[in-house]
Image (cartoon, rainbow, N blue to C red):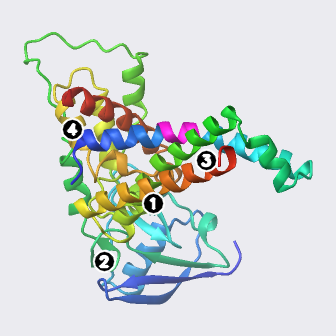
């Protein structure tokens, strides 16, 4: 049973991350459309992203928003579809958040620094 | 009006029952409740169903009509029958007692869990409380107080289906009207009771309750208000 305070925190985290995601996804789609319309190659794109602090910051925040938002949603799906409701579920969701964070930041690192 | 009869399939028995077909004569301005009543009075008197007022006030006659929960006394056959046919079943998400009658105990027990009754502090000699009709709280309560407890929203809610302990739209709507009642003294306790796994934050805002409510109430809006109020209260208490 999730306490009201925990539930409230999760709800705020879900809402705030959703607001961030709304902006990030819109910008991300615009970037994709720009890159494909301009016919940029992988090398062209990397030339623009390497060393770009703005690009790195934006996508690092995007990754954080995903790492917060997705596990909370999956937790609800698991509760409703699998009837999975115990501490192990919270641990699994936290682990998933960590995986999303690490994989996402690694990808951002790869196109901006590595 | 089309053909002279309606091909009606009605759920008979309990959870392991089946649909039975009946031919019912068409009438002008015929409601789905009229159809069910005709079957019971003229074809099979053993058919069990509930109704009382027949004018959309009591909330007794809700059933599932072609898979959609409706108040049958105010649902005209010509508006819902497709190709002259109707399928009538008991409300979803509630145990079937028999035929079209469901056991609504769980539905009403959930009204009690978030303190669905008013409790004031004024004694009988106190002056009448003055609540400005145009205050935001009164307006919010006003939007939800005409609920007749028919269970249409509850039967239409996917969250109730997936999470049977979810309080449901009607109970949360009731809680929302009381949270906005300036005279009620149980606001904090109520906000605690509507939070948690089975409470307002479990709502996905799909809006089926608002879409189907025969009284035009928007429980989705009330639940959104409860989410904000309960979250603020929970964090304030936690500090």
Q: Are marks 3 and 4 on the same chain?
A: no
Task: Check disc 3 and report its element: helix, strand or loop.
Answer: helix
Q: Which residues are magenta?
A: A16-21
Q: Quadrant of residue B6?
A: bottom right
Of labels 3 and 2, the one closer to you? 3
**Labelled pair 4, 2 in contact (Cβ < 8 Å):** no
Q: Is residue A18 magenta?
A: yes
Task: Check disc 4 and report its element: helix, strand or loop.
Answer: helix
In the image, taking residue B199 as reference, residue B87 lies left or right, namely right
Q: Quadrant of the C terminus of chain B?
A: top left
**Labelled pair 3, 2 in contact (Cβ < 8 Å):** no
Q: Residue at x 37, y 87 (%)?
A: B44
Q: Are marks 4 and 1 on the same chain?
A: yes
Give the residue at mark 1.
B73
What x and y, as percent, mark residue A86? Answer: 23, 62
Task: Check disc 2 and report its element: helix, strand or loop.
Answer: loop
Mark nearer the N terminus (4 vs 1):
1
What x and y, as percent, mark residue B11? Answer: 40, 82
Residue extending furthest right? A38
Q: Quadrant of residue B224?
A: top left
Identify the subunit bearing mark 3.
Answer: A
Identify the subunit bearing mark 4.
Answer: B
Identify the subunit bearing mark 2.
Answer: B
Give the residue at mark 3.
A109
How far apart marks 1 and 3 lie (CA) works out to 64 Å
Q: Judge whether residue B205 can be spotted in this image.
A: no
Is B26 in front, or is B98?
B98
């Amino acid at each position: 049973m999730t306490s009201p305070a925990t539930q409230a925190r999760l709800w705020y985290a879900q809402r705030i991350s959703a607001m961030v995601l709304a902006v990030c996804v819109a910008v991300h789609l615009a970037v994709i459309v720009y890159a494909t319309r301009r016919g940029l190659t992988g090398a062209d794109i990397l030339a623009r992203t390497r060393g770009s602090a703005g690009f790195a910051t934006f996508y690092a925040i995007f990754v954080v928003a995903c790492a917060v938002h997705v596990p909370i949603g999956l937790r609800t799906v698991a509760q409703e579809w699998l009837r999975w409701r115990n501490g192990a579920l919270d641990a699994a969701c936290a682990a998933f958040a960590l995986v999303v964070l690490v994989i996402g930041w690694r990808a951002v690192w790869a196109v901006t620094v590595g | 009006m089309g053909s002279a009869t309606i091909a009606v399939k009605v759920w008979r028995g309990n959870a392991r029952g089946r649909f039975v077909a009946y031919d019912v004569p068409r009438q002008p301005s015929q409601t789905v409740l009229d159809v069910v009543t005709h079957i019971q009075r003229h074809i099979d008197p053993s058919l069990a169903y509930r109704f009382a007022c027949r004018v959309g006030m009591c909330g007794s006659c809700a059933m599932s009509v072609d898979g959609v929960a409706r108040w049958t006394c105010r649902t005209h056959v010509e508006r819902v029958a497709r190709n002259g046919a109707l399928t009538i079943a008991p409300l979803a998400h509630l145990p079937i007692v028999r035929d079209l009658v469901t056991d609504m105990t769980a539905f009403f027990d959930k009204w009690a869990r978030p303190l669905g009754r008013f409790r004031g502090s004024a004694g009988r000699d106190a002056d009448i409380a003055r609540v400005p009709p145009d205050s935001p709280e009164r307006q919010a309560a006003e939007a939800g107080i005409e609920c007749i407890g028919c269970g249409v929203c509850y039967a239409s809610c996917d969250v109730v289906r997936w999470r049977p302990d979810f309080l449901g739209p009607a109970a949360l709507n009731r809680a929302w009207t009381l949270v906005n009642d300036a005279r009620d003294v149980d606001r904090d306790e109520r906000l605690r009771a509507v939070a948690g796994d089975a409470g307002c934050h479990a709502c996905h805002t799909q809006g089926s309750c608002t879409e189907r409510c025969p009284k035009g109430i928007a429980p989705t809006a009330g639940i959104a208000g409860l989410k904000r109020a309960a979250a603020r209260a929970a964090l304030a208490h936690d500090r």
